[in-house]
Amino acid sequence: MSSIPIEQAAGLIRAGRLVAFPTETVYGLGANALDAAAVERIFEAKGRPKSSPLIVHVASIEMARDLALEWPERAEILARAFWPGPLTLVVRKRADIPAMVTAGLDTVGLRMPAHPMALELLRATGLPIAAPSANRFTELSPVTAGHVRASLGDRVDMVLDGGSSTVGIESTVLSVVDERCVLLRPGVVSAADIEAFVGIVERAANPQDGGGAHQSPGQHRRHYRPRKPLFLVDPDGPLPTGQGAYLWRSTVRKALQAIHMPDNAVEYAARLYGTLHELDHRDVDWVAVERVPDDAEWEAVADRLRRAASEIDPPNTI
Ligand code: TXA
Ligand code: MG
């Protein structure tokens, strides 16, 4: 049984309008994936370049199979293992998925999200829903309905509020075309988790630049940036002068505002964007983040921190 807001949201999606909805990773800005004009509104609302393909959300494995031109055995195995959940599978696309969705590529990224409200919306519309993160281009992804409203305001027709996203960072993106598995964006479903089911996972040569068939276009470095300059620092490295916050994990130190982050990658991911959003509104000039370990477990968090980090060196370090 669907609630009134879900019915209203489904009506808007069917009418070609935009609905922001919660997923377990981050909030998505959704439109009917089979309606090119509706999908174009997503790009306009976000201010996002049309060279960035969108992830298409589905209500079931069956719906994913139906949108794929080819559905490899590896896709079936991984979907059964990880869906609903934070794994996007890139497969060859069916011809009637508009080029607007996939930035002209002949592949499409598909994901069945785990948030109950996302699934209710997908079932109520009966349509695949194209949705990038529900933020203006280059801003930090939203993990609450409030973050969506603050970023998009009335550029979105409706925001479904499903509380805080529990995973907290965007899904793992894996290409399964051409008999290979290529990791295009790390996430909390790790390469090791995937390898346990389907063998070797290759890495995209340079996922940040996009371009080649296995690249993930739209993985701009600026994509995940908070408003306050963010610096990655060693526990004994210099901090910028002025008023700042220090996100520590293993070693606390004197900084105006020391914020304790979990020393566990999955828990850290769940807290990261919420913490950075909050710091955007606090009276601090900068955010320094204690580096995370350079190992497989921390790959996704390290990736997002690298992208969030300022390209300039901290000023007047002490
Ligand atoms: O967790 C998530 O994935 C969230 C929620 C809303 O599902 N969505 C999300 O979407 O992060 P977005 O648009 O911010 O990032 C999607 C990324 C693109 O930037 C691109 O790198 C990759 O997914 N992608 C999508 N379709 C692709 C394709 N056909 N080939 C290669 N990469 C693709
Ligand atoms: Mg995004």
Image: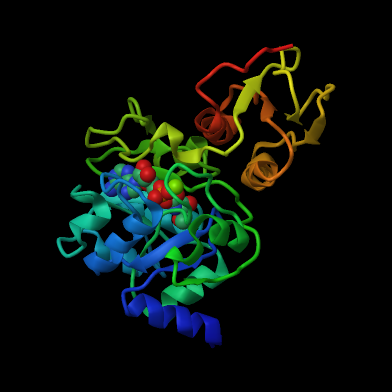
Residue closer to the observer: 180 or 252:
252
Position of residue 9 in the picture relative to residue 247 (left or right): left
- Is 256 located above or below residue 164 in the figure? above
Residue closer to the observer: 135 or 241:
241
Residue closer to the observer: 71 or 213:
213
Q: Residue 198 lies in what quarter of the image?
A: top left
- Is 101 located above or below residue 254 in the figure? below
At x 25%, y 40%, the residue is 179
At x 19%, y 56%, the residue is 99
Q: Position of residue 49 (x, y in %)?
A: 30, 46
- Is 299 located above or below residue 28 in the figure? above
Residue 34 visible at all: no
Q: Quadrant of the C terminus?
A: top right
At x 35%, y 60%, the residue is 42
Q: Quadrant of the N terminus?
A: bottom right
Q: Residue 284 lies in what quarter of the image?
A: top right
Residue 262 visible at all: yes
Q: Position of residue 65 (x, y in %)?
A: 29, 63
For this orientation, the residue located farthest to the left is: 95
Q: Position of residue 118 (x, y in %)?
A: 50, 69
At x 29%, y 37%, the residue is 180
Position of residue 184 in the picture relative to residue 72 (left or right): right
Q: Position of residue 70 (x, y in %)?
A: 21, 55
